[in-house]
Amino acid sequence: MKGSVAVVGGGVIGLSVARRAALDGWAVHVHRSDEYGSSWVAGGMLAPHSEGWPGEDRLLRLGLASLRMWNEGAYLEGLPDTVVTARESLVVAVDRADAADLKTVGEWLAAQGQPVTVTTAARDIEPLLAQSIRHGFRAETELAVDNRALINALVAHCERLGVTWAPAVGSLAETSADTVVIANGIDAPSLWPGLPIRPVKGEVLRLRWRRGCMPVPQRVIRARVHGRQVYLVPRHDGVVVGATQYEHGRDTAPAVTGVRELLDDACAVVPALGEYEFAECAAGLRPMTADGVPLVGRLDERTLVAGGHGRNGFLLAPWTAEAILGELNGAPLPEADLVGVR
């Protein structure tokens, strides 16, 4: 063994870091609670193109680097093939103002040479779309994963690699490992005061397919609906609909307004979803930084941080795991200048 590593946090980031360190020969234990936090609520989109917006160039570059790792397949080794639920995204607009916003994003991506394909016949690509929807673009390299299946698969793989579990900690002094990685989402500032990470609430719905309904879409559908964003992410038994985004402290109770808007917008994009079963409503707290770029790097000789991933935790999991491994081995990734502790 190279040494011991304690990972604080059992969500997708903490588990990805723990698994990568164990694969590299480190003795790893993970401090976690009984809850997975925002990782259990997430939609599981791996979508740097369709999530992008002009001005977020650093986050786009980081997301593209991590998406390449997903598509190259190394991160998925040892995990079931079924964790991937879609292999393309279609981004569409409902009205003229939404189409103008979408055009702005498409031109920004095209100017950087990104592989997106603009269309004015979106229903030819996805026939389930509402009849009035025509404008959009395809992001053919984007993916989506079943967030809960992935979390369970990471836990199982960690156990096969000898990773051990320990209770959550209230201070870094409670672990004796050589190195500690802070990866506990919105609670990271409690272990290292001053980390600029805050909770941002988001509601997510799950709609289950029923016999006689139209089939589940085969790709991720993202849409702008009268200025609001909504996404529809395929699952083997239905669709995940998300997500609202607003600051409300640590409140995780789904609000009527947010749920109503998600349902209205989802059905405005794909009317057939109105016949699906309303299976679940939940809210999670995304760990956000001021500019949306995560904090991944070294805090001191013993302590590393992997936090503040916001809405991109699943997308950035492979990159974050490699970046932390580079820090552990004294060989930081070349892309490290994109992030780091600020």
Image (tube, helix red, strand yellow):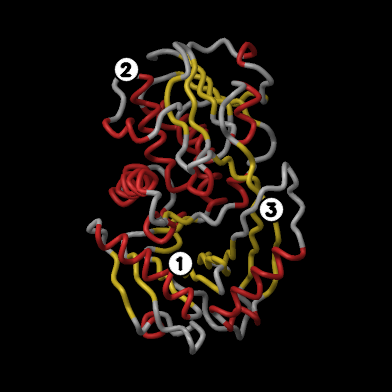
Expressed as whole percent of the image width and height from the top left, the position of residue 72 reads 28, 48
Q: Quadrant of the N terminus?
A: top left
Neighbours of disc 3 within 10 Å: few (<14), some (14-19), many (20+): many
The one nearer the camera, 117 or 84, is: 117
At 42% from the left edge and 13% from the top edge, which residue is drawn?
3
Q: Amino acid at mark 2?
A: Gly
* Label drawn at residue 164: none
Q: Which residue is mark 3?
A: 283
Q: Is residue 52 above or below residue 327?
A: below
Q: Amino acid at mark 1?
A: Val
Rendering quarter of residue 213: bottom right
Judging from the image, what secondary structure is the residue with disc 3 in? strand
At 46% from the left edge and 75% from the top edge, which residue is drawn?
93
The one nearer the camera, 25 or 172, is: 172
Q: How far, Cα to Cα, is label 3 from label 1?
A: 20 Å
- Nearer-N-terminus badge (1/2): 1
Side of 250 where 272 appears, left or right: left
At 48% from the left edge and 68% from the top edge, which residue is drawn?
222
* Label drawn at residue 220: 1
Q: How far, Cα to Cα, is label 1 from label 2?
A: 38 Å
Expressed as whole percent of the image width and height from the top left, the position of residue 195 reads 56, 27
Q: Is residue 280 above or below residue 197?
A: below
Q: Which residue is mark 2?
A: 330
Q: How far, Cα to Cα, is label 2 from label 3?
A: 38 Å
The one nearer the camera, 328 or 194, is: 194
Q: Amino acid at mark 3?
A: Ala
Neighbours of disc 1 within 10 Å: few (<14), some (14-19), many (20+): many
- Nearer-N-terminus badge (2/3): 3
Side of 297 where 334 appears, left or right: left
